[in-house]
Image: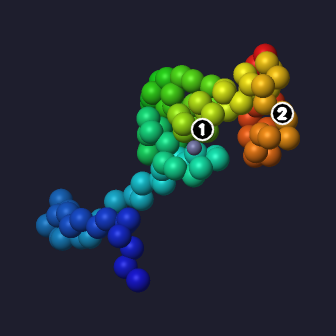
Amino acid sequence: MRSTSAKTRSRTTPSGRSIKMRKPKKPGAAHCALCACILQAVPRRSRSQLAKLSKTEKRPERVYGGVLCAACSQQIVKEKTRLATGTLLRSEVPITHLKYIQGMKK
Ligand SMILES: [Zn+2]
């Protein structure tokens, strides 16, 4: 099957020959670790192109920015606060969320 992500374009060489050049593939988008939705504000660039960006251009400046989406990190913060105040029991929190709750600063 023909790849749709590898783009080819024709270029004329200095000697006048026509050649097909293949554009490098773009890396896939970053996904949320919990709901697997595509993360916003995380650029789709190669490693060398990412190195040219500043730290704050690479991911959101938020707890778990670049790992979890906004909705999931909001839920994690809510659950952490409710666990701390005692309104939510540890058994009521989804087991996949516990890792992120434990990883947050006090
Ligand atoms: Zn998510």
Judging by the rendered image, the residue that carries numbered circle 2 is 89
Crowding at dot 1, Cα within 10 Å, few <14 / some 14-19 / many 20+, comes out as some
Going from N to C along the chain, the mark reached first, 1 or 2, is: 1
Quadrant of the displayed image that contains ligand 1: top right
Left or right: where does residue 82 sit relative to residue 46?
A: right
At label 2, which amino acid type do we have?
Leu
32 on left or right of 22: right
Residue labelled with disc 1: 72
Residue found farthest to the left: 16
Quadrant location, the N terminus: bottom left
Q: Position of residue 68 (x, y in %)?
A: 60, 38
| Whether the residue under disc 1 has CB within 8 Å of ligand 1 | yes
- Left or right, 32 with reference to 84: left
Mark 1–mark 2 distance (CA, rounded to whole Å):
19 Å
Name the residue nearer the viewer: 70 or 50.
70
Residue under the point 49% across and 42% down: 39
* Residue sitting nearer the eye, 66 or 82: 82
Q: Is mark 2 within 8 Å of ligand 1?
A: no
Query: Residue 53 location, x and y as percent?
Result: 45, 29
